[in-house]
Image (tube, rainbow, N blue to C red):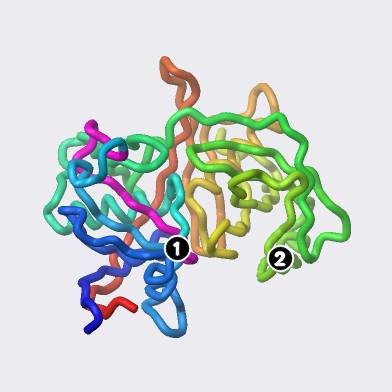
Amino acid sequence: MPQTIAFTKGQGTGNDFVVVADPDGALALTDDQVAALCDRRFGIGADGTLRVVRSAALPEGAATPDAEWFMDYRNADGSAAEMCGNGIRVFAKYLVDAGLAALDGGEPLRIGTRAGVKTVTRVETGFEVDLGVWRPDDADVLVRARGLSVARPGQGIDVGNPHVVVALHTTAELEGLDLTVQPVLDPAPPSGANVEFVVPADPLVRDGVGAITMRVFERGVGETLSCGTGVAASALAVRHWAGAGAPERWTVDVPGGRLGVRVVMHEDGEHVLLSGPAALVFSGEVALA
């Protein structure tokens, strides 16, 4: 008889997730079961799953002792991913609403991920997560996508997971992309990468805040309405291209809404922070495939 589990559906700017509470680490979802949960016709439908598990319940070597809770994020095809910027805000929203954690008095909430421990705080727009130190990649990458007449150069950005950002000239060019087909990267990164296509606003900076528009193809998922780490990577890439004097605060418009990005200097280097809303949509029970 199929196992039945409780779930909650959550979303952050249209990037949606099936949240499964497994505090004691008793649930071992297979790749096929994750894919079935995320199937939009035969399952609940989502861009990925978020398993809520106590760090202490993880296998030896995987625990994050500096954080009570660990976000086990899986893409819609079942593959594990290092980090998810929209997902971690939904994860924090779930912990707070379920009474499993508190975000009162400005105190940050520490959450374990495969990209290390991240801190989340409440902000006016919802939640802000410190994604940590970011790194540009100097490797030359060409990106081919359906709708682009020629391959375009891509900027590699690591924000805990890998991204390649491509600049386009106009919103018409951005809207003309067919992202039902996966873009081709040359050379292909060993573990793949999310690919973002961005158009700078005109003017790029207004009142000290930069602005861009973005679409994304997520590895293991396809085009999504939003990608939090991709939003951060896109703002960082445009800031990198803009050079000295580029602002430290950015707004990024995606099909699912608007997110904020800011860069802050810490002792270990420049940190990138992502802010935006998170919502829990509905809850229920489902039989595992």
Q: Amino acid at mark 1?
A: Gly
Q: Which residue is mark 1?
A: 78
Query: Please, is residue 107 above or below residue 22 in the view?
Result: above
Q: Quadrant of residue 37?
A: bottom left
User: Decide: marks 2, 1 in contact (CB < 8 A)?
Assistant: no
Q: Residue at x 79, y 43 (%)?
A: 153
Q: CA distance from mark 2 to mark 1?
A: 29 Å
Q: Dot 1 lies on which element?
A: loop
Residue 154 - label: none
Question: If you read the primary sequence from the N terminus, does the residue marked by circle 2 or circle 1 appear first?
Answer: 1
Q: Residue at x 15, y 58 (%)?
A: 98
- Magenta span includes 63: yes
Query: Please, is residue 180 above or below residue 271 in the view?
Result: below
- Residues in magenta? 62-78
Q: Which residue is mark 2?
A: 175
Q: Is residue 140 left or right of residue 55?
A: right
Q: Quadrant of residue 69?
A: top left
Q: Residue at x 37, y 55 (%)?
A: 277
Q: Give how far across and how far down residue 117 sits, in percent.
A: 33, 35
Q: Residue at x 51, y 58 (%)?
A: 226
Q: Dot 2 lies on which element?
A: helix
- Magenta span includes 44: no
Q: Quadrant of residue 289?
A: bottom left
Of the two numbered discs 2 and 1 in the rendering, the one whose residue sits closer to the viewer: 1
Viewer-proximal residue among 18 and 126? 18
Viewer-proximal residue among 244 and 130? 130
Residue with the most extreme right position: 150
